[in-house]
Amino acid sequence: MASSDRSRWLHCRAGSACRAPAGSTPRLARLQSRIGTVPDGAWGPASMAALQSYLGTYRDGARTWNARTVALLQRYLNTQL
Protein backbone atom coordinates (compact mmCIF):
# COMPACT_ATOMS: atom_id res chain seq x y z
CA MET A 1 0.00 0.00 0.00
CA ALA A 2 1.42 3.37 -0.96
CA SER A 3 2.12 5.88 1.78
CA SER A 4 -0.58 8.26 0.53
CA ASP A 5 -3.15 5.42 0.51
CA ARG A 6 -2.19 4.44 4.07
CA SER A 7 -2.47 8.03 5.23
CA ARG A 8 -5.90 8.41 3.63
CA TRP A 9 -7.02 5.09 5.12
CA LEU A 10 -5.92 5.82 8.67
CA HIS A 11 -7.01 9.44 8.86
CA CYS A 12 -10.65 9.46 7.84
CA ARG A 13 -12.89 12.26 8.94
CA ALA A 14 -14.81 11.51 12.12
CA GLY A 15 -18.37 10.39 11.48
CA SER A 16 -17.78 9.29 7.90
CA ALA A 17 -17.25 5.81 6.55
CA CYS A 18 -13.72 5.11 5.35
CA ARG A 19 -13.29 3.42 2.03
CA ALA A 20 -10.45 1.00 1.59
CA PRO A 21 -7.83 1.76 -1.05
CA ALA A 22 -8.40 0.12 -4.42
CA GLY A 23 -7.76 -3.61 -4.33
CA SER A 24 -8.20 -4.17 -0.60
CA THR A 25 -12.01 -4.09 -0.35
CA PRO A 26 -12.36 -7.91 -0.53
CA ARG A 27 -9.98 -8.28 2.43
CA LEU A 28 -11.88 -5.69 4.39
CA ALA A 29 -15.18 -7.42 3.59
CA ARG A 30 -13.74 -10.74 4.84
CA LEU A 31 -12.60 -9.06 8.05
CA GLN A 32 -16.06 -7.54 8.49
CA SER A 33 -17.66 -10.98 8.01
CA ARG A 34 -15.36 -12.46 10.64
CA ILE A 35 -16.06 -9.77 13.25
CA GLY A 36 -19.82 -9.91 12.71
CA THR A 37 -20.74 -6.75 10.86
CA VAL A 38 -22.13 -6.13 7.39
CA PRO A 39 -19.36 -6.97 4.87
CA ASP A 40 -19.78 -3.86 2.72
CA GLY A 41 -16.10 -3.01 2.23
CA ALA A 42 -16.41 0.35 4.01
CA TRP A 43 -14.87 0.89 7.44
CA GLY A 44 -17.02 3.03 9.69
CA PRO A 45 -18.29 3.28 13.27
CA ALA A 46 -20.21 -0.02 13.11
CA SER A 47 -17.12 -1.88 11.90
CA MET A 48 -14.98 -0.36 14.66
CA ALA A 49 -17.56 -1.28 17.32
CA ALA A 50 -17.78 -4.84 15.96
CA LEU A 51 -13.98 -5.16 15.98
CA GLN A 52 -13.79 -3.99 19.57
CA SER A 53 -16.48 -6.49 20.58
CA TYR A 54 -14.70 -9.27 18.68
CA LEU A 55 -11.46 -8.47 20.46
CA GLY A 56 -13.26 -8.66 23.82
CA THR A 57 -12.89 -5.05 24.87
CA TYR A 58 -15.42 -2.38 25.64
CA ARG A 59 -16.83 -0.32 22.81
CA ASP A 60 -15.58 3.20 23.38
CA GLY A 61 -17.34 4.89 20.47
CA ALA A 62 -14.12 5.33 18.49
CA ARG A 63 -14.73 6.03 14.83
CA THR A 64 -11.10 5.77 13.78
CA TRP A 65 -8.15 3.72 14.97
CA ASN A 66 -6.88 4.50 18.43
CA ALA A 67 -3.79 3.16 20.19
CA ARG A 68 -5.76 0.79 22.45
CA THR A 69 -7.61 -0.89 19.59
CA VAL A 70 -4.46 -1.16 17.47
CA ALA A 71 -2.57 -2.78 20.37
CA LEU A 72 -5.39 -5.29 20.95
CA LEU A 73 -5.56 -6.12 17.24
CA GLN A 74 -1.78 -6.63 17.10
CA ARG A 75 -1.93 -8.90 20.14
CA TYR A 76 -4.77 -10.91 18.55
CA LEU A 77 -2.93 -11.23 15.22
CA ASN A 78 0.23 -12.42 16.98
CA THR A 79 -1.74 -15.31 18.48
CA GLN A 80 -3.01 -16.35 15.02
CA LEU A 81 0.41 -17.03 13.48
Image (cartoon, helix red, strand yellow):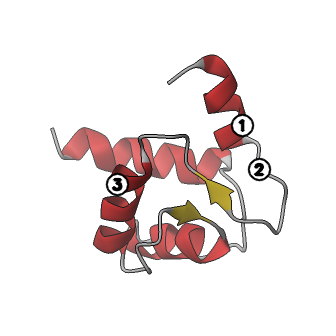
**Residue 66: mark:** none
| Image position, residue 22 (x, y; %) | 50, 40
Front residue (pair 11, 39): 39
| Image position, residue 57 (x, y; %) | 50, 70
Mark 1 and mark 2: Cα distance apart in space: 6 Å
Q: Quadrant of residue 17?
A: bottom right
What residue lies at 36% left-to-right and 80% top-to-bottom?
36
What residue lies at 51% left-to-right and 44% top-to-bottom?
71
- Left or right for 79, reference 45: left
- Left or right for 45, reference 36: right
Name the residue beneath numbered marker 2: 12
Q: Are marks 1 and 2 in contact (CB under 8 Å)?
A: yes
Q: Earlier in the sequence, mark 2 or mark 3?
A: 2
Instruction: Please tell me whether mark 2 sits on a helix, a strand or a loop.
Output: loop
Residue 57 visible in the shown view:
no
User: In the rendered view, would you say 61 is above or below 67?
Assistant: below
Front residue (pair 66, 34): 34
What residue lies at 40% left-to-right and 65% top-to-bottom?
55
Residue 9 visible in the shown view:
yes
Name the residue beneath numbered marker 3: 26
Disc 2 vs disc 3: which is toward the camera?
Answer: 3
- Left or right for 58, reference 64: left
